[in-house]
Image: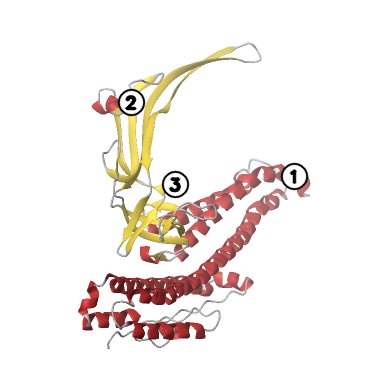
Amino acid sequence: MIDDSPFVPIACSLVIPVIACLWASLHLRRKQRLLHDLPTSKVRGVFIGLVEIKGAAEVESPFISYLAGTSCVHYNWLIEERWSRTVTETTTDSKGNTTTTTRTESGWTNVAKGGESAPFYLQDDTGALLIRPAGAKIEPVTLFSTQVSRGDPLYYGKGPDTSVSNSDHVRRFVETGLPLHAPLFVVGPARERADVVAPEIAASRDASEFLISTRAEEKIQSGLSLWSWFWWAAGLLIASAPLIFLIATAEKQNFPATYPGYASLFPIGYLIATGAGWIWMAYNSLVSLRQRVRQGWSLIDVQLKRRHDLIPSLATTIGALSDHESNTQEAVAALRAQAAATPPGVSGPDFEGVAAQLRVVIERYPQLTAQPAFAALHRQLVETEQRIALARTYYNDIATHFATRMEIIPDRWVAGLGAMKPEPLLAAASFERASVPVSFAQ
């Protein structure tokens, strides 16, 4: 019986490290899948929820780093001092014999540290987005790193005047940070700003990830995949340790014939647990991806409603300019009629062509460009159409990732457990209505 073998206590001692290795492997794999499945958004296309963006770090008043003197949006510095000492120990055995041993110990002690951090902007070709780095995992670049002795001007120039006990009078200066204008990769939860009507990225308890990195997305994903395999292999090695020990010492030890069979149960159980854990991780990842697809669909709805509400509210502001108001009101009435005719649950009509019609009006009536109200109407309409286009692009990107997962084996089999189906991609013709001309001609 297995209960009569020494493998029961061995198995109990291996359970915790094996589970820890397997959990670390699946956790890293889940993060790698999240980054792979999350489409990169433009700054202007950032809405509410978990987003992934790339851009340059910008701020009006950058910090000047303490050691390197580099303009940064965030930096930390650390000064360590090396010490060493000789330790003598005297021990006495059961027979009263005394033994004296001497050894040398050494290490590094932090003698000073500091840094500065504040909200900054991430800028791309569509705009700038506020980033609040508090609570984020930051992967900076090394700005300064050197090791000097006491004769170097840097030793006391940037470091403290006092020394640690048993000091070797050698100090190590290290500084890391996010330089100004540096390209960054950011994954985090977007929310509405409290001061203006605009999104920002900040820490949230419900967010599964908040990362600010100077590395490219591809390198981050490859690193996560590599470490995931490392921890999985480490777990398999620990689970296989009893079997490896039996095989290695079979010629020297006279083990019962049943022992190898018992020992083989450990790696077999680990492989079964790996399969079950991977199915659990993959299914939860697919559910999260499906929810983000549905969120992307709702984003289109939100932006179309914004345009539907924007046109009449802005059109009334130019009513006093001329008799163009009647044509504007007719266009607004037509837009509202089409919106009311949209079936419930449908993302709504994309009234493409409104901004284009206004551009034609500007060409025919250039004097209108001098009117602030008309300029605001045109600018808001163009911006709204851009946001709708970005929301549509985001939806199509993430829906494509979801559809691809539905086709890839073994994800396809896991998706079958929840009866998941791909969501259709959006083409302009699939939900567009006839464009409504906005004419101000008399």
* Figure quadrant of residue 168: top left
**Residue 135 place in picture, x, y as percent:** 47, 47
* Figure quadrant of residue 183: bottom left
Q: Nearer the viewer, residue 303 or 100?
A: 303
- Closest to the camera, between mark 1 and mark 2, is 2
Q: Residue at x 36, y 77 (%)?
A: 315
Q: Residue at x 61, y 59 (%)?
A: 277
| C-alpha gap between disc 2 and disc 3 | 33 Å
Instruction: Name which of mark 3 and mark 1 comes first in the sequence.
Output: 1
Q: Secondary structure at mark 2?
A: strand
With 430 as the anchor, is 437 left or right in this view? left
Q: Quadrant of the C terminus?
A: bottom left
Which residue is the site of mark 3? 134
Q: Nearer the viewer, residue 105 or 193?
A: 193
Which residue is the site of mark 2? 170
| C-alpha gap between disc 1 and disc 2 | 55 Å
- Closest to the camera, between mark 2 and mark 3, is 3
Which residue is the site of mark 1? 5
Label 1 is placed on what type of residue?
Answer: Ser
Task: Name above or below for residue 225 compared with residue 296.
Answer: above
Label 2 is placed on what type of residue?
Answer: Val
**Residue 276 place in picture, x, y as percent:** 63, 61
**Residue 306 place in picture, x, y as percent:** 44, 72
Instruction: Name which of mark 1 and mark 2 comes first in the sequence.
Output: 1
Q: Residue at x 76, y 49 (%)?
A: 2
Looking at the image, do the residues carrying marks 3 and 1 touch, with CB atoms under 8 Å apart? no
Label 3 is placed on what type of residue?
Answer: Ala
